Amino acid sequence: MDFSIRAANVEDCKDIARMIMELAEYEKISQHVKITQRDLEQDGFSKNPFFHGIIAEVPEQHKTKDGHTKIGYALYFYSYSSWSGRAVYMEDLYVMPEFRGKGIGKALMSKVAQLGLAAGCGQLNFTVLDWNKSSMDFYLNQGCTDVTTDMGYHYMSCKGEALEHLAQP
């Protein structure tokens, strides 16, 4: 399959928003998606972006039945580990179902790893749902480890009213 991987730009936000919703539907959590195309434009393509993105694209002759040529994406940002220094966090990795198994997900993840290494990062971090065995197997086959299993860490979050309450002096 002929495809290319490139840096996302502001014009890609409509397709990124579409694929975020597709990913959330696949993960059975679409009711939690609050992000809009405008949020993506502001947060990813401002002077100090909160995230970076890459796009997987196919030529016109391979477009989807709905006419899409942008068929996958990865969102990532840089973080820091107090143990090992610079890190890159991959927030999303998504390939439309009809394009899976063709090396596109591997190419997207590989590009995030390359960008992380070029920025001096020593690790790539991400989460995967516990029921998503095919993704878990894919990541393990890439040499990744399950930190929850290996080290006992759990990913925690504080949001909404709990975040507001926590922020009170």
Image: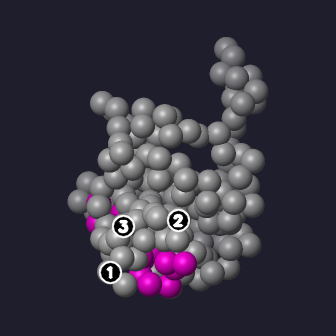
**Which of 93/83 is in front?**
93
Under mark 1, the amino acid is: Asp
Secondary structure under the numbered disc 1 in the rendered image: loop
| Vertical side of 164 occupied by 144: above or below | below
Residue tagged 2:
66
Q: Are marks 2 and 1 in contact (CB under 8 Å)?
A: no
| Vertical side of 86 occupied by 10: above or below | above
**Which of 73/75 is in front?**
73
Q: Residue at x 40, y 77 (%)?
A: 62
Residue tagged 1:
2
Under mark 3, the amino acid is: Glu
Query: Residue 46: x percent and y percent?
Result: 34, 32
Which sits earlier in the primary sequence, circle 3 or circle 2? 3
Q: Residue at x 70, y 23 (%)?
A: 164
Question: Which mark, residue 57?
Answer: 3
Range covered by the magenta-colored residues: 98-115
